């Protein structure tokens, strides 16, 4: 007997806040993950005050209940991270279980493990409820699969690689790897300590008197931009940094095209979409040995990784990229081959759709 077609819909629960999770959701929709099913995006979080966040969360919960009761959806794809996100997702899981709706919980949180390990029992109980009551769990790397297995009894944990928008792929085909007079470095991410931006400032202060070639770092992202600009000026590094704030769309495309090296010295991560965008577009990568990053950048053929919170080590790695002929090009070309095999939309959409098809 065929399933009710009207019931074959997917509710996608996530954030409107600018950043990696919202980019992943947009990329999933554009790549056709939900093609053939009616899908409904419901924002449960945004960059607003506490009272508005609470109203948004309650409104999103009501929206989901309405879709389920009206038999418009039979699957809920929950995108979550840590802290308040877990409490919100626990409510969504409860509603889904109450009304017989299947659940995929998609874990993105870079500080998920750190938060869980240091949390009160109530929070840990909420995490266990979300993990154990979901029909399938998506994680971003083997590291995160092993961690989730250690704190839950759900056997349905799958490593699903994030993938960037395909629009960045054609940058690689057009890229000119000949070195300009100034090497353009790029930082993309939240401007704050978790992403290691202040380690990068300290690294440049160590580096400026030793490096042989001219370079400039463009910083794109939301967060503590004014604090960063002040620190850069205080350290006399204005010639080495351009802090432009949040970027997206055509501006981001042009920056990716003009740059040679992505810097992301994070202290905690899942698997950053910025690194995958770099792999696809022909940017070499310098990042840290945290979260799922070492699963992607497994050895120096594909990028350089350093320990987090180590400005001197970071400075040495930047210097190595700048002073070693053809290293940026060699790493970027190898990384693009890796991207085509593991991290492109073509390599991952079928895996995700297989799970969705099995659950609906």
Image (spheres, rainbow, N blue to C red):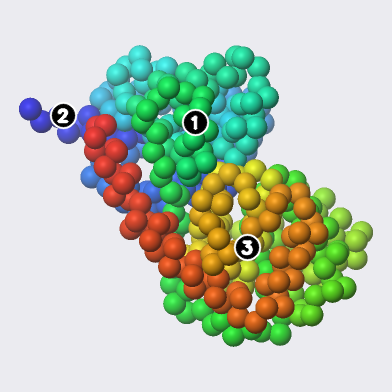
Residue 250 visible? The answer is no
Q: Which of marks 2 and 1 is nearer the N terminus?
A: 2
Between the C-alphas of marks 1 and 3, the distance is 27 Å
The secondary element bearing badge 1 is classed as: helix
Residue 147 visible? The answer is yes
Residue at 63 percent across and 62 percent down: it is: 304
Q: Mark 2 points at which residue?
A: 4
Instruction: Give the foreground label among 2 and 3.
Output: 3
Q: Quadrant of the C terminus?
A: top left
Between the C-alphas of marks 2 and 1, the distance is 34 Å
**Placement of 315 over or under 117, stated as above or below:** below
Residue at 56 percent across and 37 percent down: it is: 109
The secondary element bearing badge 3 is classed as: strand
Residue at 72 percent across and 67 percent down: it is: 318
Instruction: Give the foreground label among 2 and 1.
Output: 1
Can you give x and y, in whole percent of width and height, for residue 321 in the image? 67, 72
Q: Mark 1 points at which residue?
A: 148
Residue 304's tag is 3
The secondary element bearing badge 2 is classed as: loop
Left or right of 105 on screen, residue 212: right
Splitting the image into 4 quarters, where does residue 241 fall? bottom right
Can you give x and y, in whole percent of width and height, for residue 101 in the image? 31, 23
Q: Tell me whether circle 1 and circle 3 mark residues in contact (CB < 8 Å).
A: no
Can you give x and y, in whole percent of width and height, for residue 298 in the image? 53, 57
Circle 3: is it few (<14), some (14-19), or many (20+) Cα within 10 Å? Answer: many
Can you give x and y, in whole percent of width and height, for residue 225 in the image? 76, 53
Residue at 37 percent across and 28 percent down: it is: 155
Between the C-alphas of marks 2 and 3, the distance is 51 Å
User: Is residue 264 or residue 25 the one in the foreground?
Assistant: 264
Left or right of 193 on screen, residue 89: left
Circle 1: is it few (<14), some (14-19), or many (20+) Cα within 10 Å? Answer: many
């Amino acid at each position: 007997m065929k399933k009710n077609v009207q019931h074959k819909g997917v509710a996608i629960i996530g954030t409107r806040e600018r950043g990696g999770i919202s980019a992943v959701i947009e990329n999933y929709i554009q790549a056709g993950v939900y093609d053939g099913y009616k899908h409904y995006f419901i924002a449960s979080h945004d960059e607003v005050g506490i009272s508005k966040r609470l109203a948004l969360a309650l409104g999103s919960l009501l929206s989901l209940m309405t879709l389920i009761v009206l038999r418009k959806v039979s699957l809920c794809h929950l995108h979550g991270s840590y802290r308040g996100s877990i409490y919100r997702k626990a409510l969504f899981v409860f509603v889904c279980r109450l009304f017989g709706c299947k659940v995929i919980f998609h874990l993105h949180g870079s500080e998920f493990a750190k938060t869980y390990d240091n949390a009160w029992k109530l929070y840990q109980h909420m995490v266990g409820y979300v993990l154990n009551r979901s029909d399938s769990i998506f994680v971003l790397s083997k590291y995160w699969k092993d961690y989730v297995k250690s704190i839950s009894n759900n056997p349905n944990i799958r490593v699903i690689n994030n993938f960037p928008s395909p629009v960045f792929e054609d940058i690689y085909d057009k890229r000119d790897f000949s070195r300009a007079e100034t090497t353009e470095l790029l930082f993309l991410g939240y401007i704050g300590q978790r992403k290691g931006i202040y380690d990068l400032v300290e690294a440049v202060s160590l580096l400026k008197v030793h490096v042989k070639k001219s370079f400039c770092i463009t910083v794109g992202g939301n967060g503590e931009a004014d604090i960063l600009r002040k620190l850069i000026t205080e350290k006399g590094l204005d010639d080495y940094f351009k802090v432009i704030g949040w970027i997206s769309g055509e501006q981001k495309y042009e920056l990716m095209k003009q740059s040679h090296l992505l810097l992301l010295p994070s202290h905690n991560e899942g698997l950053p979409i910025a690194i995958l965008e770099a792999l696809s577009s022909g940017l070499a990568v310098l990042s840290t040995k945290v979260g799922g990053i070492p699963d992607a950048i497994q050895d120096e053929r594909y990028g350089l990784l350093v320990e987090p919170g180590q400005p001197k080590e970071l400075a040495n790695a930047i210097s190595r990229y700048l002073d070693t002929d053809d290293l940026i090009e060699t790493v970027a070309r190898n990384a693009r081959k890796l991207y085509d095999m593991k991290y492109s939309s073509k390599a991952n959409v079928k895996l995700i759709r297989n799970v969705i098809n099995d659950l609906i």
